[in-house]
Image (cartoon, rainbow, N blue to C red):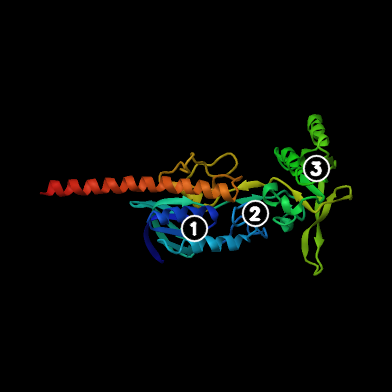
Amino acid sequence: MDRLGTYDVVIVGGGVSGLSTALVLGRARRSVLVVDAGTPRNAPAGAAYGFITRDGVAPDRLVALARRDLAPYAVEFLDGTVEGARKVRQGWAVTTSDGASAAGRHLVLATGLRDVLPEVPGAREAWGRGLLQCPYCHGWEVRDQPLGVLGSSSSSLHQALLVRQWSEDVTFFPHTLDPLPEDDERRLRSRGVRIAEGRVHALVPADGDDGAPRALRGVRLEDGSVHPCSAVFCEPGSDAALPLIDALGCALRDDGCVSTDDIGRTSVEGVWAVGNAADPAAQLMPAAGDAYRTAVAVNALLVEADCAACLDAEEAVSEGV
């Protein structure tokens, strides 16, 4: 087993929120270890949008740029999946699946989450390209095209009204929400959103010149009819559960993410959560901003602990004289 020593902070997850946390702590001259499994939530997307100065950058490129920013500071990286954690005198010790271990006085969970997609054939293949979640992230790229919204959650109606901002050609597929309440139908129709009654049978891919699936051609209903759509928006479920979180015993929210206070502190002492691990709706910029605030709070507690240790050492010397 490789023992990597003790750090001020161990961050589990090397996406935008984890690296933002590392940047602030590194600049505060803290020793930081980032353990990253290399499976970011936004990996299926071709580009990340809405991040000022980096609009349209591929997700892996964004991470590479962030890692480059960390080069001057005391931030180390370890590739691996953290599967276990235990309380130790210095804080928390974590162990990866290949046997490496390290300890941190504080532990930050930037582990993201897994999107739980609707059980519709073609959904997984189209995710991040033709099946989308956030209109603010991807609406501009499909503007003025025929768009659909899949009724998959209580927020789907609002999503359909929102998507209408990017196109005049929007169809709402109630799917599991069928039949819609009359008031909801009136709201959709008042904005010119069509309603396709019946359950969705499958998403129909649009093949490129090389035969590979690219975006969507349409939505097939159970009656066999196909409604043309270049993209479909939906609200997936979320699942932040991991063996590590189970081992730590962090309290979870009703939506399956880690419960935190307003500065990212979890129910477990010395353990924090940032980004999508704590908020499924956090986009890149707010996730980075919240991580910044959490890093400041972590450093403040480390400063207090350092001060207390100095005072204890002074008292021990005085008593020994």
Instruction: Name the residue at 39% across, 53% down.
Output: 28
* Mark seen at residue 82: 1
Q: Nearer the viewer, mark 1 or mark 2?
A: 2
- Badge 1 vs badge 2, beta-carbon distance below 8 Å: no
Looking at the rendered structure, the secondary structure element under dot 3 is strand
Q: Nearer the viewer, mark 1 or mark 3?
A: 3
* Mark seen at residue 172: 3
The residue type indicated by label 2 comes to Tyr
Q: Position of residue 275 (x, y in %)?
A: 54, 49
Q: Judge by depth and name the residue closer to the eye, 59 or 101.
A: 59
Q: Judge by depth and name the residue closer to the eye, 164 or 99.
A: 164
Alpha-carbon span between mark 1 and mark 2? 29 Å
Any part of residue 37 in sight = no
Looking at the rendered structure, the secondary structure element under dot 2 is loop
Left or right, residue 266 beside residue 88: right
Q: Judge by depth and name the residue closer to the eye, 199 or 313.
A: 313
Q: Position of residue 244 (x, y in %)?
A: 49, 52
Q: Earlier in the sequence, mark 1 or mark 3?
A: 1
Alpha-carbon span between mark 1 and mark 3? 41 Å
Instruction: Name the residue at 49% across, 39% down.
Output: 262
Give neighbour class at mark 2: few <14, some 14-19, many 20+ (Cα, 10 Å): many
Q: Is residue 197 above or below residue 18?
A: above
Looking at the rendered structure, the secondary structure element under dot 1 is strand
Q: Position of residue 280 (x, y in %)?
A: 60, 46
Q: Which quarter shows the N terminus?
A: bottom left
The residue type indicated by label 3 comes to Phe
Please identify the residue farthest to the top as the structure is shown. 183
Q: Nearer the viewer, mark 3 or mark 2?
A: 2
Alpha-carbon span between mark 3 and mark 2? 25 Å
